[in-house]
Image (spheres, grey):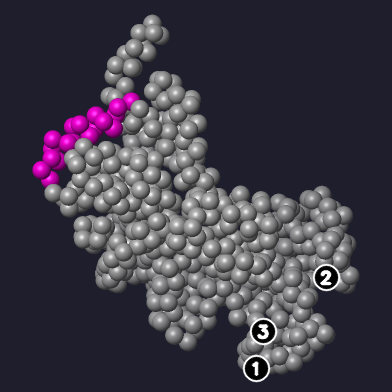
Amino acid sequence: MIEALRVAVAEHQATIGLVVLGLMFLGFVLERFPATVVAILGTCAFLFLGILSGKDLFSVFSNPAPVTIGAMFILSGALLRTGTLDAIANRIIARAQQHPRLALVEMFVGVYVASAFLNNTPVVVVMIPIMMKLAGALGLSAKRLLMPLSFVAILGGTTTLIGTSTNLLVAAVADANGLDRFGIFTITPVGLVAGVAGVTALLYIARRFLPDEAPNQIALSQEHRGFLSEVRIVKDGTLVGKPVGEVPFLKRANVKLVGLKRGATLRRTGIADEVLEAGDLLVLRLELAELLSLRENRNVVIGLTAGHDDIAHDSEEIVEAMIAPSHPAIGRRLIEIPFLSALRVRILGVARFRKTPGPDLPNARIQAVDRVLVTGPADQIEQMYANPHLYGVGSTTEREFRRSKAPLAIGALLAVVLLAAFNIMDIGVAAIIGVGFILVTRCIDADEAWDSIDGNVLVLIFAMLAVGLALENSGSVALIVGELTPLLRDVPPWALVIATYVVAGLLTEIITNNAVAILVTPLVIALARELGVDPYPLVIAVMFAASASFATPIGYQTNTLVYAAGNYRFADFLRAGIPMMLVVGAATCAAIALLV
């Protein structure tokens, strides 16, 4: 019985491979399970049927593309950790205060360039709150800007080989199929044409097809996500005698000055020119990463204590805790909270959902579900865990910026790009060396480096590489090519490019882009060889179509990010994305036909 089943599978494995592929495609579309799970189940099916051997399965782990992609994730994570992207955002916000529209143009240019050399997902993550603030400065709805942010990041990512994981993946599959290796700027001419066409179309589409709600509606809901804190100016610090408006950390986008407290007087306006004195208190609202970074500033003492100013900085632990509704101090001032006087700890800040406590840190009256950030010696912090009136006491997952390491992280990325661009070193090897450099120089800690890798992406890639190998081994690819060849025998090369782009582009809108890249690339290479045409234009068409996902929020990661942040409807992406697909697709196919 089993032997007969094996014989039947062997005789019809090409057809069986297509059936498995069809079921996987259905799984991708229905989304009952994550794409990674569907890909793994497909791999298991091929293993169970004997179409894919164990040796074949493990051979996919020697593919350099996933390793290179993981290394680029870590390099992008180092730029986030060192505050490089944050510093760029700060400059944009500073410019926006004087020239909002010019700052908007500069921001989109910056996103485009950054996405060409970094993974565009973290770029969009960083820029979403910045875009919301710009929307407020321009009097626009954030919905008019967030979707263009994603689209520009996608266009930037298609400009170089390392701009997206899809580009690297297609290049690796092409290399495995015997094509010459792609250089880091091989696709740049086509990418620039597509970028210019896409941005030009976006100027019209953003005005005509994007929702126009009340200005700053979304931004207001995001405005109060930070912590209220305060810093005391130390006597021997460099800030004494300096105007408030010239304090460096107050110029950062995610730090807002609430007021200046001198003695018992709290001033909220007209303080930019006020000269700081020792003992002055600056009341701030700032994001958690900035709050933690300020602890390293020796010119200020941050937070609130009950007279315990002798806490050793190097022995401190930091935890977050939520005030329980049963807390006996609800409604009282923060300075009166019991554990502050009972323990040698310092409250660094307090946060409240969609509101800012106040008027300052000691006089903020606590409410249920407020979050407090507390630091102190380990033995003191340990006692907080037993407090029944504090929920979720635990170490904060946020880290302070390591801004002094930013030149090292930038240099590592530039070195990787230059080594690959001048063919001095393979891009994967250069990226791994770059990762080693940023780890040893402490631009990013090892645990953060591994956390910056999107495991879902890598697992999906490995699983789909195994599926692609199974389809090739089973003869499914040859079967498809055999059926298509007579139909396409007399089709001119430029029409083949268009057909490839359309098929890959439509598939990308409904299933994950990396899956499309792995499945379609070997198919078009085999088809091109059978037809006797150059496979490179078709491979490049797959590379661009698999990334240029505009019409749905599920086709590309950055679309999904802004879909949630901007509270868009699915139809919003259809209205704006379909014209983008048509314009970018036409420009890309024309550029491939003329330039490749």
- The reply to whether the C-beta atoms of the residues labelled 2 and 3 are less than 8 Å apart is no
The outermost residue toward the left is 490
Q: Quadrant of residue 314?
A: bottom right
User: Badge 1: how crowded within 10 Å, few (<14), some, or many (20+)?
Assistant: few
Spatial CA distance of label 2 from label 1 is 29 Å
Helix, strand or loop at mark 1: loop
What's drawn in magenta, residue-wise? 474-491
477 part of magenta stretch: yes
The outermost residue toward the front is 424
Looking at the rendered image, the quarter that the C terminus falls into is: bottom left
Spatial CA distance of label 2 from label 3 is 24 Å
Q: Main secondary structure of the magenta part?
A: helix
For the point 47% across and 35% down, the residue is 60
Q: Which residue is mark 1?
A: 273
Q: In this view of the protein, can residue 106 be seen by the observer?
A: yes
| Viewer-side label of 2, 1 | 1
Spatial CA distance of label 3 from label 1 is 11 Å
Q: Quadrant of residue 278?
A: bottom right
* Amino acid found under the numbered disc labelled 2: Thr
Which of the two residues, 369 or 455, is positioned nearer the viewer here?
455
Q: Which residue is mark 3?
A: 247
